[in-house]
Image (tube, helix red, strand yellow):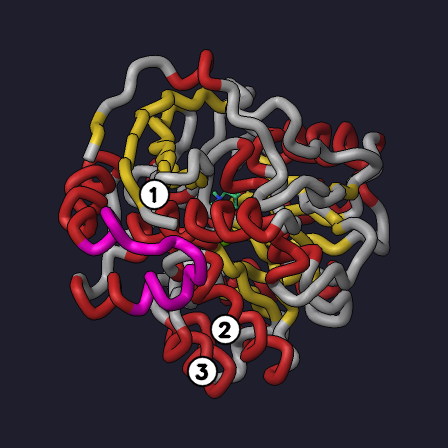
Amino acid sequence: MKITKLTLWDVPLTAHETYYMADGKTCDDTPSVILCIETDTGLQGWGEYCAIPGYLPAYWRGTAPAVEEMAPVLLGADPIGPAAVMDRLNAYLQGHPYAKSLIDMALWDLTGKAANLPLYTLLGGRMVADMPVYHSITCVAPEEMARMARDAQDQGITQFQVKLGADADWQADVERLKAVRAEVGAGPLFYGDWNCGASALEATRVGRAVRDLDVMLEQPCATIEECAHVRRATGLPMKLDETAHDIPTLLDGHAKGCMDAVALKLSKFGGISVIRAAREMCLIQGTQMCIEDCWGSDITTAASLHLAASTPARGLMNTCDLNHYVAPRIAPDAPVRQDGRIAVPEGPGLGITVDDAVLGAPAHIF
Ligand code: 0XW
Ligand code: MG
């Protein structure tokens, strides 16, 4: 089989509810880059990358030039065996994990379709029947966030991500965490996520004020060192996200004792092939995994679900149904959450059907 054509579309995604994070970051309107890799057999593979402005060292307009740069390695290559193709791409162009992620996703989709097997089988086999999803709550007034948590809990959600730091008021963050815990009661797992937006001092003050709430802190500060300091000063468990983005940073987070949990996001690491290795490390280190992507619609969601479904339950904290938060749906047959859990698609490859009508005109063809 040979790759004959790469087509990219820019599909604007709109969040159903305004989504505020620290440092003024939002993902209300974000273009998602969709890739179709075509082959001489007629089989197609699909990938997606959606950039949240300021979230990663990446921007959506940068995706197409990076894919174009890698096109000479891809065109004419045999797509079966994604890790081998990615190895050649990594030798050709260092870095650019966001652009590699959607390529790697499409190669895995093609490989699964050629084998007539769902991706979770190629990734080790199905380990869990279905997966818990967490619900992410935008950083607004505490009572409003508590209402959102209640609504999600009424729909069966048992894990919550509470966004913090949008108004740089550490006492408001304390109130947010208190209000959500009071609303959902004891038991549900919940974590406050600053997206790097707090100083170690602010995060420590918040953590100490909510010490009795059974809360996990997520990525308070911009470096692993500061997060480790907050972990030590508060005694609260910590999830790393932005600063854990490759194998060396996973080793560092573990060595510094501040990685009780971690977000394995596809485009942060560079795709399914890298996350496969990262997940083995987390299993060995005993780190709880959230397997997901940064943002996106049905294609990124489906890729996350296949990785999550092939992860042993002892290491899988949750996954994220990004397709729950945005419109339009790009593959309307992709799974959606039900009673706080989500299933994995059963068809070959990613197991979803992309709706051409939603894509519009291609932005680039290589
Ligand atoms: C990347 N987000 C803003 C979207 C996902 O819901 C998770 C969240 C995060 O930063 O963890
Ligand atoms: Mg996060």
Residue in the image at 21% along x and 28% along y: 364
Q: Nearer the viewer, residue 312 or 252?
A: 312
Tell which circle, 2 or 3, labels the residue nearer the N-terminal end. Answer: 3
Q: For mark 1, does the 10 Å Cα neighbourhood hold few (<14), some (14 to 19), or many (20 or more) residues?
A: some
Which image quadrant: the C terminus?
top left
**Three-letter amino acid code at the position of disc 1:** Asp
Is residue 14 shown in magenta? Answer: no
What is the secondary structure assignment of the residue under circle 1?
helix
Mark toward the start of the polypeptide (1 vs 2): 1
The answer to whether residue 85 shows anywhere in this view is: yes
Residue denoted by label 2: 277
52 sits to left or right of 157: left
Say what amino acid the circle numbered 3 marks.
Leu
Q: Residue at x 38, y 53 (%)?
A: 79
Number of the front mark, 3 or 1? 3
- Span colored in magenta: 73-87
Residue 41 coordinates in the image, percent (x, y): 42, 39
Quadrant position of residue 140: top right
Q: Which residue is mark 1?
A: 23
| Mark whose residue sits in front, 1 or 2 | 2
- Which is nearer the eye, 45 or 294? 45
Residue 84: in magenta span: yes
Instruction: Determine crowd level at label 2: few under 14, some 14-19, many 20+ residues with C-alpha closer than 10 A.
Output: few
Q: Which residue is mark 3?
A: 251
